[in-house]
Image: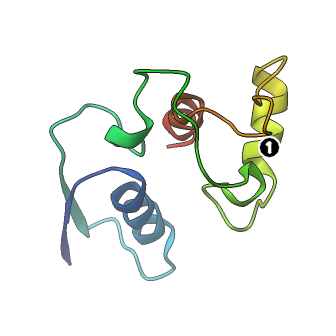
Amino acid sequence: MKIAVVGAGISGATIVKTCINHKNFKKEDHIEVFEPREILGVGLPYDHDDESIMLNVDPEVLSYDSSIPNDFVEWLDENYKEPYNFEGLVSRPKYGRYLKERF
């Protein structure tokens, strides 16, 4: 089987991961990813441009893998002394670093 994925932000990278982990995926299957950037999962919204740009979603619902619901929160605690701002929000670049590491 041949699969083409256009864009490897969080959605495209998740599709690739899901296909590879699927029980019917075989060694001879081929996935072609069309992405101009060298990293998977991050996408432009989570680039490392400005730590003051915050996610508008609770970090507890942002794990890349639904089978590990607290993964992002635990990753934050392991990697940052104070990951949240005064409103309990996390910067988009921090989420980008998390995605880059996980994918």
84 sits to left or right of 5? right
Residue at image point 80% right, 30% down: 86
| Residue 88 placement: quadrant | top right
Amino acid type shown at disc 1: Val
Vertical side of 42 occupied by 15: above or below: below
Q: Residue 45 in the image: state x and y as whole percent.
A: 38, 42
User: Which image quarter is the N terminus in?
Assistant: bottom left
Vertical side of 51 occupied by 65: above or below: below
Residue at image point 73% right, 54% down: 58
Q: Residues within 10 Å of mark 1 (few under 14, many from 20)?
A: some
| Residue 16 placement: quadrant | bottom left
Please tell me which residue lies in front, 51 or 30: 51
Q: Residue 98 in the image: state x and y as whole percent.
A: 59, 35
Residue at image point 54% right, 21% down: 51
Please tell me which residue lies in front, 87 or 26: 87
Residue at image point 33% right, 59% down: 12
- Residue under numbered circle 1: 73
Q: Residue 39 in the image: state x and y as whole percent.
A: 34, 34
Extreme-top residue of the structure: 81
72 sits to left or right of 78? left
Q: Residue 61 in the image: state x and y as whole percent.
A: 71, 60
